[in-house]
Amino acid sequence: MLSPLSSGTFNRPLSSEGATRAQPSTVPTTHEVLERVASSRQGLRFPDELLISREPQRFNTQLNLQITAVQRASDYLNEAELSLRGLAQTMSREKRQRQLRHARQWVERRVQQSGGTVDRNFTACLDRPAQIIFQCEALDPLLVTEQREIITFALGEGTFRRWASLVIAPEMSLGQRLFALNRALGQFRIWCYYDLPTQRLLFTLPESQWLSMATWTVRGGGICFAADSLTVLRPQPIPCFEQQLHQLLTNETTAVGLNAEQAVRHLQQERQKLLRQRQQVDQQLAQRDLPVEGQQALRMAKLIRQQLSACHGEFRGLNQALQCQANLPTAVVYQLIVGE
């Protein structure tokens, strides 16, 4: 049997319709519903899309993106966990097949459903693109070769092909060779490092660019790679949680299998990490000033319009000044614009 839901389960805000059914005698206002939701969360006053849209002056763009990323990752991991928990229930064969199909579709549509906030290991990546870790055994000789060689990498086809070169010298240490590789491959957004536990060369790449790696080629000086032609490189992704989860949902047997309880435990751990992210965002919100009132916002908008109409070619400088206000307290921006 699967373990019960953890205490860090995230709940969505109650809708006004649900609150009306709970108290048919009175119709609560939107403010009352939001207060009721806030009290039920026991201090987890984390905003969702509802609050962002209702209070547009409350958050700046950067904080809005952070809030949205946390929520999308949380929603996806929550739904994935519920899908796996449903498989532990007793059900008919036909219903179980439907549940398996739903879970597989949810895993396969990870990028779309999570908005790119969950990577292949089902780890939330809020401040960076989801990465793929892969290896390419054909490049391992570059770390041990004792002869000087010019290596040229290419990515793309035809006129869209990009090139990057480096020199491997015998006197170069392992760190210097890794630095040279990263300096060249960084133009393709590829980062390499030497994994000491496994003693192998590994690479990382944004998941959105993985399909372009089919055209990854290299040319050498006749030592590690041929000098008269391009050698196609075949990167291999490192086994990940998503692959093991797909094998579990398709009933494939592997030497090191993943059962449903282990999968749910992994998802719970990742959701606990997101819970801490929510608490950090809550602290940021608590330190922010109150939103500008309607009359103040109208007055500031009129003053900005007057300044824009009188800038006479200095719009770029004024625009840069206005962009700075997103990270300043509201009171400071108001004083700068109004002059009080």
Image: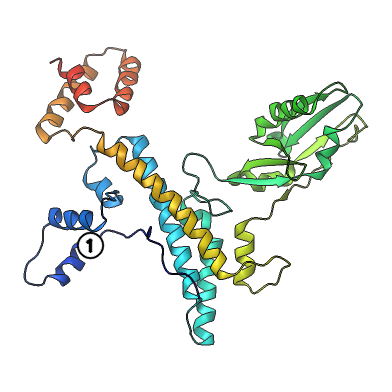
Whole-percent x, y for residue 101 in the image: 54, 73
Assess disc 1: are there few (<14), some (14-19) or many (≥20) residues with their C-alpha within 10 Å of its C-alpha. few
Q: Which quadrant: the C terminus?
A: top left
Of all residues shown, which one is farthest toward the bottom?
Answer: 92
Q: Secondary structure at mark 1?
A: loop
| Front-most of residues 277 and 152 | 277
Kind of residue sitting beneath label 1? Ser
Q: Circle 1 is placed at which residue position?
A: 15
The correct choice, above or below, for 151 with respect to 74 in the image is above
Q: Position of residue 261 (x, y in %)?
A: 54, 69
Q: Quadrant of residue 55?
A: top left
Residue 230 visible within the image: no
Question: Residue visible at 30% across and 51% down?
Answer: 48
Q: Residue at x 64, y 55 (%)?
A: 240
Q: Nearer the viewer, residue 27 or 319?
A: 27
Q: Position of residue 203 (x, y in %)?
A: 69, 40
Q: Is residue 124 above or below residue 109?
A: above
Q: Is residue 196 above or below residue 317?
A: below
For residue 151, which quarter of the picture? top right
